[in-house]
Image (cartoon, rainbow, N blue to C red):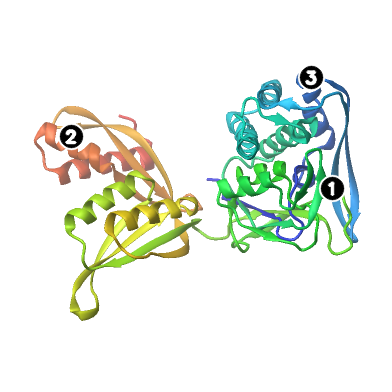
Amino acid sequence: MVQERILVIDCQAAGISGDMILGALIDLGIDNEKFRDAVSVSKKYLKRIKSLQIEIRDVKRKGFRAKRVEVKAEEDYEYRKGRDVKEAIIRCIDDLNLQDEAKNFALNVFDTLTNAEAKIHGENTQDVHLHELGSVDTVVDIIGTAFCLESLGLFKNTRIYSTPIAVGGGTFKTQEGTLSSPSPAVVEILRSKNFAMIGGPINAELCTPTGASILVNVAEPINHFPLIKPSVVGYGAGSKDFEEFPNILRMTLGKNTSEFFSDEVSLIETNVDDVTGEVIGHALDKLMREGARSVSIIPIYTKGNRPGQIIQIISDHDNVEHLSRILMEETGTLGARIIPCKRHILLRESFNIKVRFNGTEKSVRIKVAKDNKGKIVKIKPEYEDAKKIAEELGLPLREILALAEERARKIIFEGTKS
C-alpha cells in the first residue's frame, strides 16, 4: 500500500491567487513545456482570443526565489456569461483527457466562483456577467491547476490542507469600481465553505476570487502544520514585489509519518437533565440524518445529584452550526460546547464475498480496516447483511458472523476464491 502523502498550502502570509497556485504546483515538479501545451487548449474553446502566451520563469520576491506564471493574452470582450466560460472549461478538460477527479474539481471550482458572483450581483449562475473573471486567465488557472494536481498524483492518497488565508486590506480598483479587500466575492466563497481568513499584513488585495475558489475545493482548513516529513517544496510568486514581505505562496509536499491516517473534526456536546428518552432518541435520529458522523449519549449525575446525559456529536467542521442548531431546537438545551479534534483513523475498505451457510450461498459485505502501512487491523462482516441472513435461514447471528469472517480471512490471506 502506498504511504499517505500530505500537501500543505501555506497562504497565511501572502494570501493566494490562481497564478501563485500554478507557480507553486509547477515548482513541485511539473514540466514547463507540458504545462504550456496543456493550458494552451483554452485558446481553442474560449472565443475572442487573438493571442495567448504562457510565460514561466524564476523570479525573486524579497530575495527569495519562486516560480512565476504569467498569462499574456489579447482578448476582444467586455464580459462573458458564466455558461460560456463553463462550456469552454468542459471542452478543455475533455481535450486534455483528464480523469473524472480532475474534471469534477475544475467544474466545482468554477461553480463556486459563479455561485459567489451570482449571489452578490443578484443574477443566476448561467447568465452572470464575468468581467475580469471571464478572461482566459481564469480558464488557465482552473484547467492548469486540475492538470498539475492530476500530473502530480495529488487527487489520490493525499490529504491537502490550507492554513488561514491572508486577505490584505484597504481598497483596490476593478472594472466594477473601487472595492474593499477582501472583495465581496472572496468573502462569499470563504463563507460558503467555512474557511478562515485573516486581515493584513498590508493594505492590498492578497486573495483573489479564483485563488479562493481553487483552494476551498481542494484543501481542508487547519491552523497549524500537521505532522509531516517534507519531501519537496514549491514556491509560487505573486505579480507584485511588496516591500513588507515575500509575495510567495508555499506548498509543502511530504509523507505522513504516523502509522495512522488522520483527519480533523469538531466535537459538539451538551449536558441535559430534563429531557425525556423519547425526545433524545428523536434528536439522535435527526442529527444522524442531517450529517453527524456519530452521536453518543453518556449517562451522568448533574448538580443536585440529578441523573442526566451528555450528548456528544462528531461533526465535520462545516456542519457544526447546522447540527448545533438542531441540538438546541430538539432538546431545548441552552448551549453547546464546540471542541476541534484531531483523530487517528484506520483506512476502511469494503467488498462483497459469497459464503455458504448450510448449503445456501449468500452475499455478505466485508469491512477491512488497515493502518497507514497497509497492515490489516480488523476484518468484520457487515452487521445488517449478517442479520438479514440469520433471519432468512433461522440461524444464530453469531454463527453467520463467524462463518463470514472465516471466509473473508481465507480470501484475504490465502487467496482462496471458492
Give the Cα separation between the discs numbered 3 and 1: 29 Å
Residue 272: horizontal and vertical position, in percent?
Answer: 26, 66
Which one is in front, 378 or 343?
343
Callout in the foreground (3, 2): 3
> What amino acid is labelled 1 in the image?
Lys
Q: At 59% from the left edge and 31% from the top edge, which residue is drawn? A: 104
Mark before the other along the chain sequence, 3 or 1: 3
Q: Residues within 10 Å of mark 3 (few under 14, many from 20)?
A: some
Mark before the other along the chain sequence, 2 or 1: 1
Q: Is residue 94 above or below residue 311?
A: above
Which one is in front, 169 or 19?
169
Which one is in front, 165 or 126?
126
Which one is in front, 122 or 182?
122
Is the residue under label 1 in contact with that under label 3 (CB below 8 Å)? no
Q: Which mark is residue 259?
A: none
Q: Which residue is mark 2?
A: 389
- Which quadrant is home to the C terminus? top left
Q: Is residue 221 above or below residue 289?
A: below
Q: Is residue 346 visible?
A: no
Q: Is residue 258 visible?
A: yes
Q: Which residue is mark 1?
A: 67
Q: At 87% from the left edge and 55% from the top edge, which residue is drawn? A: 65
Is the residue under label 1 in contact with that under label 2 (CB below 8 Å)? no
Q: Residues within 10 Å of mark 1 (few under 14, many from 20)?
A: many
Residue 161: horizontal and vertical position, in percent?
Answer: 61, 53
> What amino acid is labelled 3 in the image?
Lys
Q: Which residue is mark 3?
A: 47
